Amino acid sequence: MQRKISGKAFVFGDNIDTDQIYPGRYLELVAKTDIASHCMEGARPDFASELKQGGIVVAGRNFGCGSSREHAAITLKEAGASAIVAESFARIFFRNAINLGLPVITCPDILDKVKEGDLIEIDLLTGEINNITTKEKLQGQGLSEFVISILENGGIKPLFKQKYS
Amino acid sequence: MHALEKILAKASGKDTVKAGEIVICKVDLAQVNDLYLQVVESFEEMGGKRVWDPDKVVFVFDHYAPAPTIKSAKNHKAMREFVWKHGIKHLFDIDKGVCHQVMPEAGLVFPGMILVATDSHTTTHGAFGAFGTGVGATDLACILMSGELWFRVPEVVKIEIKGQVPRGVLPKDIILHILGKLGTDVAVYKAIEFTGEVVEGLDVAGRMVICNMAVEMGAKTSYIHPDDTTLNYLKGKGIDVNNIDIPVTDLDYSYSDTYTFDISDLSPQVAIPHSVDKVVPVDTLKGTKVDQVFIGSCTGGRLEDIEWAYKILNGRKINDKTRLVIIPASKEVFLNAIGRGYVQSLIEAGATFSSPGCGPCLGAHQGVIAPGEVCVTATNRNFPGRMGSTGADIYLASPATCAASALAGKIVDPREYIGEV
């Protein structure tokens, strides 16, 4: 696992729910590329194409609230998000993202300090976030050892595969 | 320890656990719904060969029942084949209803158990003193392989509900009011215990409504301490309650937060677009034109909810510019509603009935809404696009407010329509 992740920030507000991240009408889709094509469609309809070059999703409180749909984490990962930083996360979304190997970092005042298009760098272990554009540093919460161990293995699937092979 | 901590301690083979600790617990019941063929895909991708205990696994086809598209039909087909191949004991196919209704009806839910499902509204089972929590597909696939899952032991928020329930105020109004006051993230990563004289006075259906919507406050799980009401319900489902070990919260347990609500003066409440915590008294919305009303789902599709619609609409006709969709939460609910004459009366009043399942609650089928339309619904979420178009407005309300609004063609206070009910 890369300890440090950097990328362009795409900024969203509070309570970005799973219906905005991945509308319910697409839940029957299973192929990852199909799921990726509807990324954040309920909040920003062209986001899947905006994210093609990669980037970091930045959001406010309670990101991923609502449904347990894993599609919400899959669509962000497959559309090219390398990490998500939010002021807080809904717990099922948090679990789903970690299980898929998508780093999620909690940082209480991120929306005050990071604007759309800023280049930011995240240290997953310490939770430190460096806004390269504004040269400001922020302190988010580092991930627990347990969570880091899942991310280091590329998600829970490779871990289970190893255990049950 | 809290009763919920005792459940996690027992399931993880420990004497004690404390909030914040990560524990690996044995799961008593794992349930997959039909949105999640990904469970099967993840299981196979991880090299799963056999299901850890086929008797403890439940598949429910509810979100797409009956299949509205070829894709969802293919998903059902693949899931049925998985169920049969692995000898999974419980398959509730398209005729049965919503997972959170059919599992308790089948006697699969009891106090002290850990129930994990691929559905966020699994908090519903706190109404039975169970530790119920929702997860995504890959977590569930891990359970199918190992019978276990990791949990962070949650802090517990206590919500005490006091007072006399006013006439025309339903459990849905009470939980909407609490949501409006506390917000959608008051219990993120935490559990919520509901307590107090109002909770004690609620029947099982009412408790299920309250616990169901705990997830809208971010809760991992919810809890109501089992009492005679709970045990009588369980006995009715064929469960031997004498063999159940009901954990009890220690007197010195310290809650992370405590909130008290007195609902004696509460009026019917409505959550306005587009957030569950934007809650106002129904009076402030009076006159808002309504295109569709929906009564159904794991929140508002039980017999008690359909009974409210019957009481308000029996012998009347709904507004001719408004549609009323009613979907019983389960086959059992449907049969009871037919047996009591509610279905005939409501169809005569202008209601459209569909077969048991989640219906338009998540925008899949059976009554999705168009841009510019207004839907008043007994369900649980009013996120943009939840029930169809992102250009539609969703108002969450009690089944009584829903039925009265269908009659008037606009949002109204149901107390004006319930007479001596």
Image (cartoon, rainbow, N blue to C red):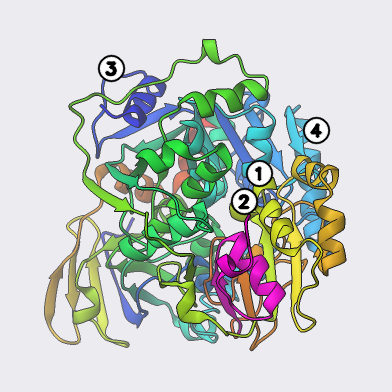
Q: Considering only order in the chain, which callout, 4 or 1, is on the residue closer to the N terminus?
A: 4
Q: Element under label 1?
A: helix
Q: Is residue B407 above or below residue B16?
A: below
Q: Which residue is mark 4?
A: B84
Q: Nearer the viewer, mark 3 or mark 2?
A: 2
* Label 4 Cα neighbours within 10 Å, binned few <14 / some 14-19 / many ≥20: few
Q: Horizontal and vertical percent for residue B383?
A: 52, 72
User: Which residue lies most toward the left here?
Assistant: A136
Q: Would residue B68 be visible to someone looking at this image?
A: no
Q: Quadrant of residue B361?
A: bottom right
Report how many numbered discs are placed on residues in the image.
4
What type is the residue that disc 3 sits on?
Asp
Q: Which residue is mark 3?
A: B15
Could you give the CA–CA distance between mark 1 and mark 2, rounded to whole angstroms? 8 Å
Specify start and end residues of the magenta stretch as a single range: B392-421
Q: Considering only order in the chain, which callout, 3 or 1, is on the residue closer to the N terminus?
A: 3
Q: Which residue is mark 2?
A: B298
Could you give the CA–CA distance between mark 1 and mark 3, rounded to whole angstroms? 33 Å
Q: Is residue A30 above or below residue A147?
A: below
Instruction: State yes or no: discs 1 and 2 in contact (Cβ < 8 Å).
Output: yes
Instruction: State yes or no: discs 2 and 4 in contact (Cβ < 8 Å).
Output: no
Q: Nearer the viewer, residue B16 or A149?
A: B16
